[in-house]
Image: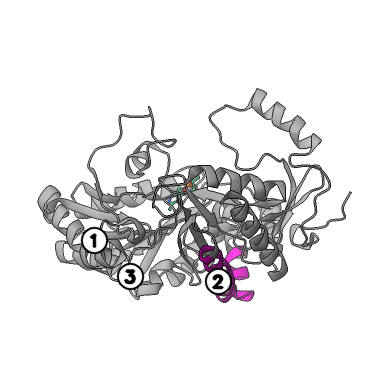
Amino acid sequence: MYQTTHGPHLPQERRLVTEIPGPKSQELIKRRSEAVSAALGMSMPVIVERAGGGVIIDIDGNSIIDMGAGIAVVNVGNSADRVVANVKAQVEAFTHTCFMVVPYLGYIEVCEALNELTPGKFKKKSALFNSGAEALENAVKIARRFTKRQAIVVFEHGYHGRTNLTMAMTAKNMPYKDGFGPFAPEIYRMPMAYPYRWPGGAEACEREALDEVLHKIEKEIGGENLAGIVIEPIQGEGGFVVPPKGFLPGLSDYCKKVGALFIADEVQTGFARTGQMFACEDEGIEPDLITTAKGIAGGLPLAAVTGRADVMDSIHGGGLGGTYGGSPIACAAALGAIETIKEEKLVERSAKIGQMMRSALESMQAKYSIIGDVRGRGSMQAIELVKAGTKEPNTEALGKIVKYCQSRGVLILTAGTYSNVIRLLPPLVMPEHLLKEALTILDEAVASAV
Ligand code: PLZ
């Protein structure tokens, strides 16, 4: 067996000692299928034993390079030192009082940190929840209550969660919505500024998308009925779609003009992922509300709505809450994760990782005609796979590439409305040699799928 103490101290290497999945994983995956609902997916068929830095170690002793970070959650790495220390201390002090019954300092400090770190020079306040979807639900509640209006605008390819309201907000039917309706009303979906797939191309997208969306909002909803626009500054599950410059500021300006709220869903883009603390900073956008989760707490379940103090305070007392929202343990973890991001300069590190990934992916694109597009920002980078010489989604190649990487001990994630996008989201503490190794294997994988 291997020697370990805490996660980050695991040997930072790719090491295969069995086939993937190994015999122990295979056995447990059988148990999994006996005990766990068939509805739950599985990106990689191994059972984890430990994880830290840039690796996941499975129960057969294979050390796998983690290019997914649990879907952009463990940005600070698994079991990061400060997260572990804070959680241990908190578990020993108390595990739960319910913040609405007896408050505690950790919750207050997380809100203070969010108010300070999120974009926007105005006074802000926060409220904490358990999951990204719950944060989105609450942002919509707040926007409707504040504006006394109902219409919410969302976008094609958008993803906001799996609860009833957030399913209505999420674009993709399979697997997220199929057969789960009826969905919540007053959700209006607009075309997304998706440069690669905009009819007429990327330049036309930059010229046309904003006008088209605003025109549709005016004609189909009416600005006076609009409570808020909810958008991921870079779409995550939708395939790392990066709108052209000007699109997000244009939406934000429109919201100001009609008295609606601009709500940035930074659940996937937040906490140093894009080479900035939040993706909205890239164009100097100051959202009225911002939803966060995932990277906020180094792997513990926590989410937040942060925004203009006048908006956050416009809700009647007792109007927001939940038994576990802002659990003291998750808050302790968040304070450890935020400190780690600052102390280890992970914002800068994210930008650097991003450059390495970007140039590797661009050189793959130059070699392999099945890579139609390379896009992303900072340490969220993706390739969109197409049939050579067309823009037709190439899902066969995607399957082959994922399998090839897995069999060599590299975990990669997929995305996209057309299920043809490979997205890279490594922990920001990934050592350079591991990142390079993962990119080399990805290159071989694409070559094998051409
Ligand atoms: N908003 C932008 O990316 C979660 C979904 C995983 P929860 N994305 C991962 C899956 O298949 O269920 C996400 C997101 C954005 C909201 C959410 C929802 O966050 O914490 O999963 O509820």
Above or below, 28 against 229 in this view is above
Give the structural element (helix, strand or loop) at label 2.
helix
Q: Is residue 373 left or right of residue 253?
A: right
Position in image of residue 184 (x %, y %) = 29, 36
Q: Which mark is residue 209?
A: 1
Q: Amino acid at mark 3?
A: Glu
Residue carrying label 3: 286
What main secondary structure does the magenta stretch of the protein show? Answer: helix
Q: Between tags 2 and 1, which lies in front?
A: 2
Magenta residues, as a range? 337-366
Query: First in sequence: mark 3 or mark 1?
Result: 1
Separation (CA) of disc 2 from disc 1: 28 Å
Separation (CA) of disc 2 from disc 3: 30 Å
Residue carrying label 2: 359
Q: Amino acid at mark 2?
A: Ser
Give the structural element (helix, strand or loop) at label 3.
loop
